[in-house]
Image (tube, rainbow, N blue to C red):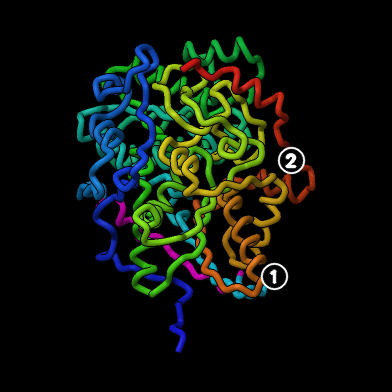
Amino acid sequence: MTKHIPSRLYLSEEELPKYWYNLRAFMKNKPAPMLHPGTLKPATAADLDAVFCKECIKQELDETTEFIPIPDGILEFYRAYRPAPLIRAYFLEKALDTPAEIYYKHEGTNTSGSHKLNSAAAQTFYAKQAGLTGLTTETGAGQWGSAMAMACAYYGLDLTVYMVKISAEQKPYRKALIETYGATLIPSPSNTTEAGKKILKKIPGTNGSLGCAISEAIEKAVTTPQCRYVLGSVLNHVLLHQSIIGVECKIAFDKYGVKPDIIIGCAGGGSNLGGLIAPFMGEKLQGKSDVKIIAVEPASCPSFTRGKFAYDFGDTAQTTPLIKMYTMGSGYIPPANHAGGLRYHGMNSTLSQLYHDKFIEARTAVQTEVFDAAIKFAKIEGILPAPESSHAIKVAIDEALECKRTGEKKTIFFGLTGTGYFDMSAYMQYNAKTMSDHIPTDEELENGFASLPKV
């Protein structure tokens, strides 16, 4: 007799994971080390100390510890909104008339509206523990900035957020939320930093990018006493913190006897995707699983599918260490579409290495098709998804319809990174049929590749 799976695969507070899953410890072929931009030698803890908190640096450089305990001071914060819901999409399955089973992890039930709070809490806790008084950061769509504002309010630190200019204009309520929690928000690029001034001089009227905002946030951090910079994606310690998503899912799936055949996550800098797949990929690397993992990125910012696997700067001003990743070049400025959290020029080094070694597949999706899927999901499942999450929803629907075509019953699992209630201008544009798609030309990509360092 087939076991009935409830619509929500519950975990109790006692089942909340007490550790993060360090995926790199399970990789035989490790990601290439970060390089000091001056010496081109592997970056050391001392090299990173002026920018990041010591504990985050330690985690960034740790490639051997498989399971890293979560401190009580972070678990206390997590208990306010975790475990996050893991949901069987019965309504979506019925609407698609598919033999597939579909599950999604809903990370948007906290006030920030996304998964970003998992790392924001950790990084802010470590900053407080180190005796710092302030932090700086960037934000694209605003989820990370919102999460950091919440975490800094909880732990009692000052925060300055540089938000990509086009996103700040498209999402005024994100600005309001960030400021409600006491942070200072500055649209980027701005004239408040030397990096911002240079970018504005070089590209007058630019809509900005995450690379621009990172440059400004780093400059502010290194010129402010008792202050450090925190990043919401791309770096490996961020993926480590986000692994609580995948670990929770693994515990719940094992509890209910479910084994995913396909895991799908949206991909910008990599925080959501890396966190979602961590323990499942760990099993795949150990030969215990043949799960299919699909990364979905916007066609307008296709670092996996059209980028180059090369060392590159993480920011537009070229001040960060060099990271070996799939990238379109730090000089690439993506078009002003609504996939704000996915508008980054490069991809996390661990995910880049896994993709290069063919453990991950990648697909692109154009903006209007992403919103087609978002509207369908909202009407059927009753949750308005973030544009970023909707990339994963689009491919999950594609895979479910493929199961319908073949008659094959597969278990599909995707990450719902957050809600779209701060993205109403995008939904208004979609409903008014004024939304357009942009796929960069080869010439546009070559302009970005021209900024790659000669390493």
In the image, residue 420 lies at what x, y percent?
57, 50
In the image, residue 140 lies at what x, y percent?
53, 35
Query: In the drawing, what numbered circle is on residue 437?
Result: 2
User: Circle 1 — which element?
Assistant: helix
How far is disc 2 from disc 1 in space, using C-alphas? Answer: 28 Å
Residue at 64% over, 45% down? 364
Q: Amino acid at mark 1?
A: Arg
Q: Which residues are magenta?
A: 75-92
Could you tell me if residue 421 is visible in this image?
no
For discs 2 and 1, the disc positioned in front in the rendered view: 1
Earlier residue among tags 2 and 1:
1
Query: In the drawing, what numbered circle is on residue 405?
Result: 1
Query: In the drawing, what numbered circle is on residue 104?
Result: none
Q: Residues within 10 Å of mark 2 (few under 14, many from 20)?
A: some
Residue at 46% over, 20% down? 216
Residue at 26% over, 39% down? 125
User: Circle 2 — which element?
Assistant: loop
Depth check, front residue: 335 or 313: 313
